[in-house]
Amino acid sequence: MEFVVNVPPPNPVALSFIGSDVVITISTQIGSTYQLQTSSSLSPADWQNVGVAVAGNEGLVALPHANAASESQRFYRVVTTR
């Protein structure tokens, strides 16, 4: 199983498994929104949104991907908008 997380600085990232879910936790800033995306391949990448975009709160935000822990390969990124 391989998981790659791509989040631009200064957002520290934690990746955890809770049951069958993959949860990516990032630090956020007020005024920005954060959208978790996933792809099963990087060549070519086919990024799909996971859940809905969340607003930053100057704290940590958990971005879950339900039932993803059983997948053999998955890539993640978080798209930030201001």
Image (cartoon, rainbow, N blue to C red):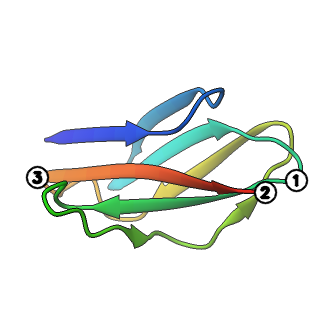
Q: Is 82 on the left or on the right of 5, as rendered?
A: right
- The quarter of the rendered structure image containing the N terminus is top left
Residue at the location (46% across, 69% down)? 50
Is residue 69 depicted above or below 12 in this figure?
Answer: below
Whether tag 1 and tag 2 are in contact, CB under 8 A, the answer is yes
Q: Position of residue 25 (x, y in %)?
A: 58, 40
Q: Secondary structure at mark 1?
A: loop
Nearer mark to the viewer, of 3 and 1: 1
Q: Nearer the viewer, residue 42 or 59?
A: 42
Q: Position of residue 39 (x, y in %)?
A: 27, 62
Is residue 24 depicted above or below 54 in this figure?
Answer: above
Instruction: Kindly identify which residue carries mark 2.
Output: 82
Tell me the kind of residue under disc 2: Arg
Tell me the kind of residue under disc 1: Gly
Q: Which mark is residue 72?
A: 3
Q: Earlier in the sequence, mark 1 or mark 2?
A: 1
Whether tag 3 and tag 1 are in contact, CB under 8 A, the answer is no
Q: Position of residue 52 (x, y in %)?
A: 61, 73
Instruction: Kindly identify which residue carries mark 1.
Output: 31
